Amino acid sequence: MTNKPPIFLETPINKQDLWGIADTESIEHHIHIWLLDEQTQNKTTQELIRQLQALHYSFSLFKGSDELNNSPKEIEPKVLLIKLTQSLTSKSAAELQVIYSVVQEYNCPIFIITPDDDFQSRLCATRLGIKEYCLDSLNSNQLTKRISDIIEYRYSAETRVLFIGDDPGIAKKHITPLENVGITVATLDNPAAITETLLEFKPELVLIESQVDSYSGSDIAGVIRQYGRWNQLPIVYLSPLSTVAQQDQSVFTGSDGILIEPISDESLISAIYERIYLSRRLNSAINKDSLTGLLNQSSIKEAGKTTMMSMRRNQGTTTYAMLDIDNFKAVNDTYGHSSGDAVLTALARLLKSRLRHTDSIGRYGGDEFLIILSNCGDDNARNIFDDIRQLFCNLPFHHMGKKFTCTISVGLTRTSEQSLDSAELIDIADNALYIAKQSGRNQIAQISSTDIPTCINAPIPLLA
């Protein structure tokens, strides 16, 4: 077999790779939510809608299943919320059939929001095909986070699959249906190039033929598992039934499952999505900050190392931004820690909504955030973070009838130098942040290897 380089299939430009207010809003406006609720004027419902709309999700409201069935639906839902005022177990068979029909009709995450937290109610929801079960005792912040988390798992990231195999016919047969539903696929017929391919392509799942030239699937999976960063990467084998029946099961070790061929396109797509969504949720629990949903400190540091490795291979540039909330202790002392948490969460959502999905965003500690961007020019980076700074300082927060606002300071550094490592860039960005603080807060300071520190500021009072 010839040692061919990995093939990266061409895909259209994704709007999530673009910056700018208009582009970002168009990305998030494509998330359309349907809410089925008999009490649409309920205070809790209205607050939930307000918070989700603040994330640029659009809404259609329906007071009942009849209204839903009879209304013109120009936009299909990406999420369906069904808010109940009575228990599922108290509903008639006909009423349950209506809910079941709605669940079956729409291929999207469906939430039941209900007052009941008992086994029979949860079992009923499961039998109706509903996976997301929320109690209406959750406050609007908790519900918003639960819903936005599911949206992130399902829609915000590009779904990337690496197919490893040396039969072009089999590859095309399985790649085509995946690409038809928007999954980005790269193919590799030379397992010896697996390390470079994983680093460059960053797949969320690896699909391997049971035999690739002289290598078994378990050979390839074993090599992948030797690297700590890919210990949790889902690996799935494709194998004919005859092979599964005849082979010792040890040849399938190291995988997260076996897909038996022949397999329908629908079953293949469903199996791939299920494993990727589960992996995203598990990775979120391990790698993300529970309050903000951003990467935790260890994960953002690891992301920095990976970004720098990619920069060196591709002769690119990397920008590090260290950001924190000005006088955050005063917010906690004056308005309480729950208000402080609301401020942190709002900033996290703003960062996610204004940056590319390929950028790494982490909560570095307390009220400090670290953002790592690839191939972003100096002026572009300053403009992006100045936009974020101005938007954040105009966000109103409320506590016991009092309104207040907060500001942020940002330290930036950008490099294309091969000699610097991620830890050094974090220190430089942190020094730039210190300069922004010492210069009066609510501004951006930048340090590079060639420039003296520069600041962008527009002083605004911390509390209003």
Image (cartoon, grey):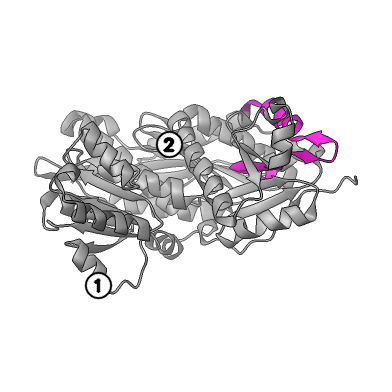
- Left or right: 392, with 40 as reference point: right
Residue 41: tell me if it is visible.
yes
Instruction: Establish if 180 lies above or below 206.
Output: below
Q: Position of residue 51 (x, y in %)?
A: 25, 51
Which quadrant of the structure image shows residue 428? top right
> What residue type is disc 2 on?
Phe
- The amino acid type found where label 1 is placed reads Ser
Disc 1 and disc 2 in contact, CB within 8 angstroms: no
Q: Which residues are magenta?
A: 199-228
Give the camera-side residue of 132 and 281: 132
Residue 272 to residue 20: above or below: above
Q: Residue at 67% across / 33% down in the picture?
A: 420
Residue 94 image offset from top left, x and y in percent: 20, 56
Front-lying residue, 3 or 114 = 114
**Of residues 3 and 221, which is closer to you in this image?**
221
User: Would residue 25 be found to the left or right of residue 179 on screen?
Assistant: left
Kindly identify which residue carries mark 1. 71
Classify mark 1: residues with Cα within 10 Å, few (<14), some (14-19) or many (20+).
few
Q: Secondary structure at mark 2?
A: strand
Instruction: Tell me which label, 1 or 2, sits earlier in the chain.
Output: 1
| Percent coordinates x, y for residue 256 in the rendering | 59, 33
Which residue in the structure is indicated by mark 2?
A: 369
Name the residue at the left extreme: 401
